[in-house]
Image (cartoon, coloured by chain):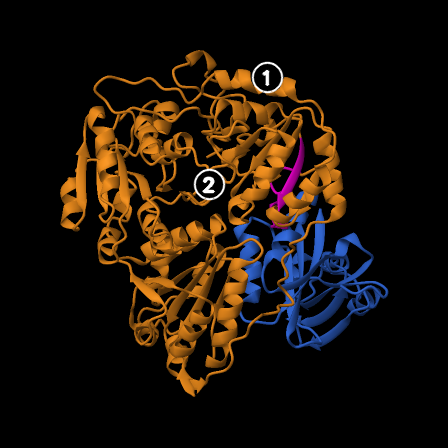
Chain colours: A orange, B blue
Amino acid sequence: MKLNGAEILIDCLQKEGVEHIFGYPGGATLHIYDALEAQEEIIHVLVRHEQGAAHAADGYARTNGKPGVVLVTSGPGITNAVTGIATANMDSIPMVVISGQVPSPLIGNDAFQEVDAVGITRSCVKHNFLIKDISEVAITVKKAFHIATTGRPGPVVIDIPKDVTINQMELEEYPETVKMRSYKPTTKASNRQIKKASELIANSQRPILYSGGGSVIGNASKELREFTRLLGFPITQTLMGLGAYPGTDELSIGMLGMHGTYEANMAMHDSDCVVAIGARFDDRITGNLAKFCPSAKFIHIDIDPSQISKNVVADIPIVGQTKQVLQALIEELKDEKLEDISKWWSQINTWREVDSLAYKKKPGVIKPQTVIEILYEVTKGEAIVTSDVGQHQMWAAQYYLFDEPRRWINSGGLGTMGFGLPAAMGAKIAMPDKDVVCVTGEGSIQMMLQELSTMLQYKTPVKIVNLNNRYLGMVRQWQEFFYEKRYAMSYMDALPDFVKLAESYGHVGILVEKEADLKPALIESLKQKDRTVFVDIITDPNENVFPMIPAGGAHCDMLLAGRDDMVSKDETDFNAV
Amino acid sequence: MRHIISVVLENETGALSRVSGLFSQRGFNIESLTVAQTNDPSLSRMTIVSTGDDRVLEQIVKQLNKLIEVVKVSDLTSQDHIERDLMLVKISPTKKDNFDLKQLVDVFSCKIVDVTDSTYTIEISGKTKKINAFLDAFDPTSILEVSRTGVTGISRGKKLI
């Protein structure tokens, strides 16, 4: 049977088990859309902007672990998707993006809606392909899914010229496996490294486990729990790692880094053995590298060798999947006698007593922290929470304690405002039975508002919790601290009436101006199971995120809320962003 | 420190731009880069000369290995190796060049490959330092044009990449 390239492509996607595609049609993808329309296995979600498609596919992938699939047209279709692709790339999210391209004979001629998609996306994908002939369609799709989902996952772009989708050939068997001589990701760690690491762990006096996104993406949550409890070590998690280890557990000392807890950062600073599990020593974690963990030895577990010794030299590097490495370490350490670390724990408990997340309520204003605390209470901590980027993201990470992985969906690496709403839509499609809440701010939400329309069309009831402080809060906070309160362009003027806006998109809008109305409003929004509810909450415009390590500071130089005596007097390093 | 890095990669369009893109994206510097097909037409071999300390080199090697199309990466400078650079140079000797060009060409074991009434074109190959020394022998104003390939290299003995 002869099929055209578009039909072969859709056939391949079906065989890959794709159930949802997020996309937007255009001239170069008309044949592909024609083939999509003729089948029923794959549901296509028509977004309102290609960036929304990429974020939705990303949120989908983060929630259920399956690769997100995006379909966009050539030119502006793919350039609009670039921010979403880069977002997924920074957070190692498996994604396959199919972009239409102008017909092969026109490539390079500045044809209508032509861009060099492979060139533009090269630096923000795990890999990309330009298909040159219809015979390459099946093998390229196979390779794309293989590359996107194995090793350290990431987005893969397939650029398909229009003529390739039109030409016909006999349908061949879809390859079951693919072998590439140039791509063989390491999965199993070396035994020697496991033994060396176990020895260091067993002899450490002030150990700390530092777990990142790799524990979530690598589905290592079960092993991480077993490992942590076996050792009885304190565990801190990065913004990307939250939930892999339960946030409410006694051994959890909270998030670390720029807005991490006092106990987590102090414990990192004083530790003699840091076990990094699927984390990459990002600058938001380490602060000033020269002052980072001055007395620690580092064990670094990562699937990607290039992360090891990139920022911090590892004493014992272990390249492998977090899940498999942790299993091996558990095996090695389960009968081992460990050092008594009760002194270390009592030190950590004195740091805990500082209660660095405490904040003062003010009569007449709603504190953003209170919103997250109440949200946590009314969802029993079980919602999938997506967020945008800024202060609200940090408050959500600090005050919503995630007990399970894949419940906290945020753009950690790239820090993409606009991510939250489409990601929530993707998450709801992946997990229709779960409550999905998008914690956002009036700045971020306006970057992707148009997806409210998609959410009505595809009936993805999400709860939007808008912390409306009339400021680009994180920018304002830095201007207050480091630019002598010169608030350049951080005030949000001429805001829309979000209630009316939600209603005009066919959703429910609720305005909350008093703290007394907050809990009933959130309960009400959750009760409306089948509706998207936009809860616009007017919060304290002057609140700041604490604790905070100023850029260029060390973990022990934290700024704490309302405690001026602990404010570091060091000059801020403006070279550290 | 100077490093010569050999990279074997799939001979596909775009592979070169992935490598050069990686160097500019991550702020690694390139002194020279040469690339051509190998005896296996599906593979290309690239030789890159870069500078950096051990940590930079480690990152360069790891990041190159991470590129999907890269099959093998090897730091030639860490082993016994042979390196060669080829130069074609067009020279018009001035009065300051008070030596016999033919003799100089013999000293450097190179070849005069083209002659006109006012110019000589010379082909020379060898280590980068030798080629630089050859150029230094001339008055700078006599050197009209230089075209160099950049370094290519291979390990000594039976060892393969």
Q: What residue appears at the point 60 percent right and 33 percent down from the top-left corner?
A: A229
Q: Quadrant of the N terminus of chain A?
A: bottom left
Mark 1 = which residue?
A: A346
Residue B115: image location, x then y, percent: 69, 76
Residue A467: image location, x then y, percent: 27, 34
Query: In the displayed structure, would residue A152 be above or below residue A283?
Result: below
Element at label 1? helix
Magenta-colored stretch includes residue A298 = yes
> The disc labelled 1 sits on which kind of residue?
Ser
**Residue range highlighted in magenta:** A297-313
Separation (CA) of disc 2 from disc 1: 27 Å
> The disc labelled 2 sits on which kind of residue?
Glu
Query: In the displayed structure, would residue A19 be above or below residue A132?
Result: above
Is A443 or B17 nearer to us in this picture?
Answer: A443
Element at label 2? loop
Q: Earlier in the sequence, mark 2 or mark 1?
A: 1
Q: What residue appears at the point 73 percent right and 44 percent down from the top-left corner?
A: A193
Q: Is residue A185 left or right of residue A432?
A: right
